[in-house]
Amino acid sequence: MDISVGTKVEMKKQHPCGCREFEILRIGMDFRIRCCGCSREVMLPRSKAEKNIKRIIEAKE
Ligand SMILES: [Zn+2]
């Protein structure tokens, strides 16, 4: 999966605020993502994050 910092993705599991869109802030052992609905930041283990991504909405150039 082609993910880089700045990519917007749709997750299978929605954030408690109801939004499914997240922006990737940091990639490493853990992914740091920001909810596009409420701007909260979340840390996820890489394996979990990759499984959770449904589709890429917008890739950064
Ligand atoms: Zn949210």
Image (spheres, rainbow, N blue to C red):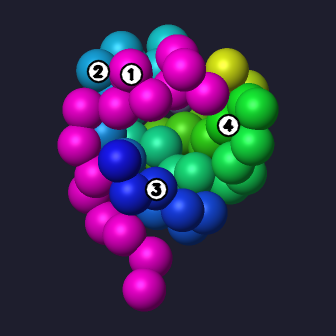
Residue at (39% x, 57% y) in the render: 2
Q: Which residue is mark 4?
A: 31
Real-space Cα distance between discs 2 and 1? 5 Å
Which callout, 2 or 4, points at the residue further toward the start of the chain?
Answer: 2
Q: Which residue is mark 2?
A: 12
Image side of residue 16 versus residue 59, left or right: right
Q: Which residue is mark 1?
A: 52
Mark 4, secondary structure of its residue: strand
Residue at (37% x, 69% y) in the render: 59
Image mark for residue 3: 3
Which callout, 4 or 3, points at the residue further toward the start of the chain?
Answer: 3
Q: Nearer the viewer, residue 12 or 49?
A: 49
- Tell me if mark 2 has few (under 14), some (14-19) or many (20+) residues whose alpha carbon lies within 10 angstroms of its own: some
Residue at (74% x, 31% y) in the render: 30
| Amino acid on which disc 4 is placed | Phe
Mark 1, secondary structure of its residue: helix
Percent across and percent down for residue 20 are 35, 32
| Amino acid on which disc 1 is placed | Asn
Which callout, 1 or 3, points at the residue further toward the start of the chain?
Answer: 3
Real-space Cα distance between discs 2 and 4? 16 Å
| Amino acid on which disc 3 is placed | Ile
| Amino acid on which disc 2 is placed | Lys
Mark 3, secondary structure of its residue: loop
Q: Which residues are magenta?
A: 46-61
Mark 2, secondary structure of its residue: loop
